[in-house]
């Protein structure tokens, strides 16, 4: 038996190696992203360790149905099925459904014996967050109409309008949530978020190309008016929506636990105590980085909060101020219609009326983008955002990737100085183990379980891990692409789109989702997808400006 080998000439081997090397270098970002996706997905699946129930489901259900007052409450709601999800290593939640609606929730813990922490009858209490006015379907409907009018284009058969439709559909997330229909909320939310994440990444990272000309829908509807009349109407609508946001936001009576936690933590700081471990009446109210509490220290000085029986309405003023700040920033960088689109995005108004910290985070993130021409100050804002909530840490590589030389050194120094200040504040309040205590409290965000997640509905492995790996792969690929593509590196709108895709990816892959998280990404969407009147390709490169919405 014989064998024959084919010997390639040395010149051909060199040619093939050169060709292969050239192709790999040209597609380095794609290759790195694909490798990250594959390795990350496999690694996450293999290392996945789900949080286990602290009390077996059968035992938890038995105690809930036999111990008062939970037993009497559950007997009155006529529930049909129950789902149990772990909250942490000490507590788990029992969710009682009648049909598609959650009618009761019970939190069960174990401290040497089974403890029922709380039991809530949702047939007698509103499930919705925030103001009754903000959650009114008529108000949400009017906001949707104005939102579409200000963000859509003509002709209607444009991809831009699909973007607008996806964003508008997220209003249904709030509507379904308010009725306790969590499964329907998830079935509406995750497809829309997936589309928007993919669309942002594609819009930003593909090669710019011409697209069909389109006209803002508002200009089409108001075509009989003069330009001066259209501008006056835009100013009037912007002012009217700003006033409406302020009035509805400040009049809300429903500050949620996140607002109380921020104020209680800030009050603890005023008394020289570290927030971690000092917010007992809000379950895991200490799960945020230290800046989430430092920001509210001046407001806690004016109106201290020691528990849920105190008044935390000052958080509403913070949320309103942050929303108006974002509106002003979008008006300045992108135009009047962008400000109106932000103020009429229906989930925003509901979020403001909860007193949560999410609107303040949006304001900090927008500040980082507005400081685009000054990388040092921009990274200071981005670092502050990462110390406010952990999520912005994922977009910092995108902001750093475009910098080189002295600009990169200044930006890194700014980020380091911000972090040192936060660490000094931690040590001053709680000693040298304070950073460890903060990280321990924050770890809850990575282990929590909830009915407010697609992964609870369909199971985590292996799809959730794929979403997590895809988000990391996007960051890796985008950083390499930004470093190698000067046109992309200097285009604020396209990098804003990548940042929006990353933030959306993090929301999709998380164990818990709420519509208030949408406001993190919305300023980036307004600066990119919704700012391009051509509704197709990314805009021409501009070093210090983004395309404007007239």
Image: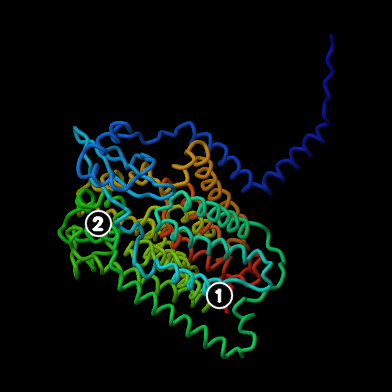
Q: Position of residue 173 (x, y in %)?
A: 46, 58
**Quick check: 1 above or below 20?**
above
Q: Nearer the viewer, mark 2 or mark 1?
A: 1
Kindly identify the residue that appears in the image at 42 percent across and 66 percent down.
348
Horizontally, residue 282 falls left or right of residue 408, namely: left
- The image quarter in which residue 536 lies: bottom right
Q: Is residue 433 visible?
A: no
Q: Position of residue 58 (x, y in %)?
A: 32, 31
Q: Position of residue 376 (x, y in %)?
A: 43, 64
Horizontally, residue 263 falls left or right of residue 477, namely: left
Q: Considering the numbered disc 2 on the image, is that residue within a helix, a strand or a loop?
A: helix
Label 1 neighbourhood size at 10 Å, few (<14), some (14-19), many (20+)? many
Discs 2, 1 touching: Cβ within 8 Å:
no
**Count of numbered tags:** 2
Colouring rule applied to residues: rainbow
Q: Quadrant of the N terminus?
A: top right
Kindly identify the residue that appears in the image at 56 percent across and 41 percent down.
37
Who is closer to the viewer here, 149 or 258? Answer: 149
Question: Mark 1 highlights which residue?
Answer: 150
- Say which label, 2 or 1, has the lower sequence index: 1
Label 2 neighbourhood size at 10 Å, few (<14), some (14-19), many (20+)? some
Who is closer to the viewer here, 132 or 539? Answer: 132
Q: Quadrant of the C terminus?
A: bottom right
Who is closer to the viewer here, 13 or 549? Answer: 549
Q: Is residue 469 visible?
A: yes
Mark 2 to mark 1 CA distance (whole Å): 44 Å
Horizontally, residue 197 falls left or right of residue 132, namely: right
Question: Mark 2 highlights which residue?
Answer: 425
- The image quarter in which residue 271 lies: bottom left
Q: Considering the numbered disc 1 on the image, is that residue within a helix, a strand or a loop?
A: helix
Kindly identify the residue that appears in the image at 42 percent across and 53 percent down.
393
Who is closer to the viewer here, 93 or 394? Answer: 93
């Amino acid at each position: 038996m014989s064998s024959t080998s084919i010997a390639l000439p040395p010149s051909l081997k060199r040619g093939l190696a050169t060709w292969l090397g050239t192709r790999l270098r040209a597609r380095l970002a794609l290759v790195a992203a694909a490798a990250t996706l594959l390795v990350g997905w496999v690694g996450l699946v293999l290392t996945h360790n789900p949080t286990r129930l602290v009390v077996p489901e059968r035992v938890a259900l038995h105690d809930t149905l036999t111990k008062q007052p939970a037993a009497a409450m559950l007997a009155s709601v006529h529930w049909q099925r129950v789902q149990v999800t772990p909250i942490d290593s000490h507590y788990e939640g029992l969710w009682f459904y009648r049909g598609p609606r959650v009618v009761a929730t019970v939190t069960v813990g174990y401290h040497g014996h089974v403890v029922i922490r709380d039991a809530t009858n949702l047939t007698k209490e509103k499930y919705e967050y925030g103001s009754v006015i903000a959650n009114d379907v008529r108000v949400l409907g009017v906001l949707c109409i104005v939102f579409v009018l200000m963000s859509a284009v003509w002709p209607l058969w444009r991809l831009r309008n699909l973007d607008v439709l996806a964003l508008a559909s997220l209003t249904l997330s709030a509507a379904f949530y308010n009725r306790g229909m969590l499964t329907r909320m998830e079935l509406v939310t995750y497809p829309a978020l997936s589309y928007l994440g993919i669309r942002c990444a594609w819009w930003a990272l593909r090669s710019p190309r011409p697209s069909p000309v389109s006209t803002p829908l508002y200009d089409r509807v108001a075509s009989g008016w003069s330009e001066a009349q259209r501008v006056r109407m835009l100013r009037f609508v912007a002012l009217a929506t700003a006033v409406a946001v302020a009035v509805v936001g400040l009049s809300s009576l429903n500050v949620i636990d996140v607002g109380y936690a921020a104020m209680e933590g800030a009050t603890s700081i005023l008394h020289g105590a570290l927030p971690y471990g000092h917010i007992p009446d809000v379950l895991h109210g200490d799960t945020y980085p230290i800046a989430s509490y430092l920001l509210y220290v001046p407001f806690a000085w004016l109106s201290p909060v020691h528990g849920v029986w105190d008044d935390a309405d000052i958080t509403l003023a913070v949320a309103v101020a942050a929303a108006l700040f974002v509106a002003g920033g979008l008006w300045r960088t992108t135009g009047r219609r962008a400000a109106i689109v932000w103020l009429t995005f229906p989930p925003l108004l509901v979020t403001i009326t909860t007193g949560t910290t999410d609107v303040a985070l949006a304001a900090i993130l927008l500040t980082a983008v507005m400081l685009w021409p000054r990388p040092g100050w921009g990274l200071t804002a981005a670092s502050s955002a990462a110390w406010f909530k952990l999520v912005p840490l994922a977009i910092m590589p995108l902001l750093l990737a475009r910098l080189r030389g002295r600009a990169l050194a200044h930006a890194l120094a700014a980020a380091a100085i911000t972090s040192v200040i936060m660490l000094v504040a931690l040590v001053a309040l709680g000693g040298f183990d304070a950073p460890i205590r903060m990280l321990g409290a924050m770890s809850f965000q990575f282990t929590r379980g909830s009915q407010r997640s697609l992964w609870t509905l369909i199971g985590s492995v292996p799809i959730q891990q794929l979403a997590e790996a895809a988000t990391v792969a996007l960051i890796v690929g985008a950083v390499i692409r930004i470093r190698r593509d000067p046109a992309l590196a200097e285009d604020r709108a396209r990098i804003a789109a990548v940042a929006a895709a990353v933030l959306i990816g993090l929301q999709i892959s998380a164990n818990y989702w709420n519509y208030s998280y949408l406001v993190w990404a919305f300023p980036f969407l307004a600066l990119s997808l919704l700012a391009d009147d051509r509704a197709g390709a990314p805009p021409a490169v501009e070093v210090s400006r983004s395309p404007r919405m007239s």
